[in-house]
Image (tube, helix red, strand yellow):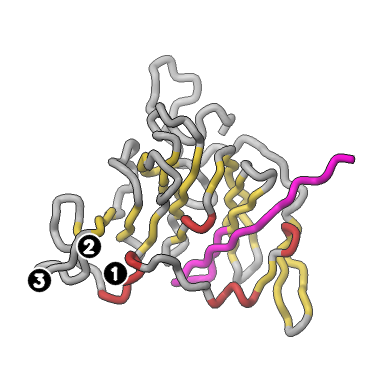
Amino acid sequence: MTQDPVVRLHLYFARDNDRAVILRQGPSKQFRLILWHRDTDRFEDGQWLKHKVYPEHCDLSPDGRHFLYFALNGDWSGVSEGAYSALSRPPYFTALSLFPEGSTWGGGGRFLDNVHYVAIGGADVIGRDEGLVRLYQRTPDKDCPTGLRTADGRPAKIAKAEAERAFLRELPPDPALSLYDTIGGRLHRRRGNDLVLIRDFTEMTFEPIRAPYDRREPGAAEPQPWHPLDGEGS
């Protein structure tokens, strides 16, 4: 008897508006990004990724426009070094920036505000996160009390409350999580002791989707830089 794949939904909420991102998992190493407009319960079904994504190492920007994720592809001798952190625009995995990590011990990142973020990994191999600023965690000192500096070593101009988010070992649960339930790949809204179904995500199957901001040339004769969606028909 063949069992249906287990579907899990991981939720990420924008802090500045009603946007949220759903990271759909299932089968185990297939993931899909879905943009959810909570004010109208409208969904934008996005790309799939056939690499293992670590939900606990992902984060959504306060305005819901950018997503940081950590994935494993196991190609330890390749450009990705086997595991990588990447920044994208939901509901797409197509990377604006990609930081090879080389292990599964760390990875991922945090948004401190809509512009500044920290990401674990090496130098960016794509370099298309225009308007965003990657910060680096350094030892706090008199010149830089937060310990967060830009790539050229300058202290980051960022509020203390936002800066503290970079140093938390784990992010606190979002209060919005208490409003919803994700039993069996189905999204419900909590109303007292009752659950009201919003949408069932269990029947989705892989389909190739191209991000509108993807600059890779399909079928190009010249070699192109490695990308996490290579070979997946996306």
Instruction: Name the residue type under label 1.
Output: Ala
- Residue that badge 1 annotates: 163
Kindly report the distance in space between the C-alpha atoms of the residues bearing marks 2 and 1: 7 Å
Residue 126 appears at what percent x and percent y?
34, 37
Q: Earlier in the sequence, mark 3 or mark 1?
A: 3
Q: In this view, does 166 lie to the left or right of 140?
A: right
Q: What stretch is highlighted in magenta?
A: 1-21
Kindly report the distance in space between the C-alpha atoms of the residues bearing marks 3 and 1: 16 Å
Mark 2 and mark 3 residues within 8 Å of each other at the beta carbon:
no
Query: Disc number at residue 142?
Result: 3
Residue located at (42% from left, 52% from top): 108
Query: Disc number at residue 148?
Result: 2
Of 54 and 230, which appears nearest the observer? 54
> Which residue lies most toward the top here?
221
What secondary structure is marked by label 2?
strand
Q: Residues within 10 Å of mark 3 (few under 14, many from 20)?
A: few
Of 23 and 136, which appears nearest the observer? 136
Instruction: Name the residue type under label 2.
Output: Leu
What secondary structure is marked by label 1?
helix
Q: Which of marks 2 and 3 is nearer the N terminus?
A: 3
What secondary structure is marked by label 3?
loop
Image mark count:
3
Of 10 and 35, which appears nearest the observer? 10
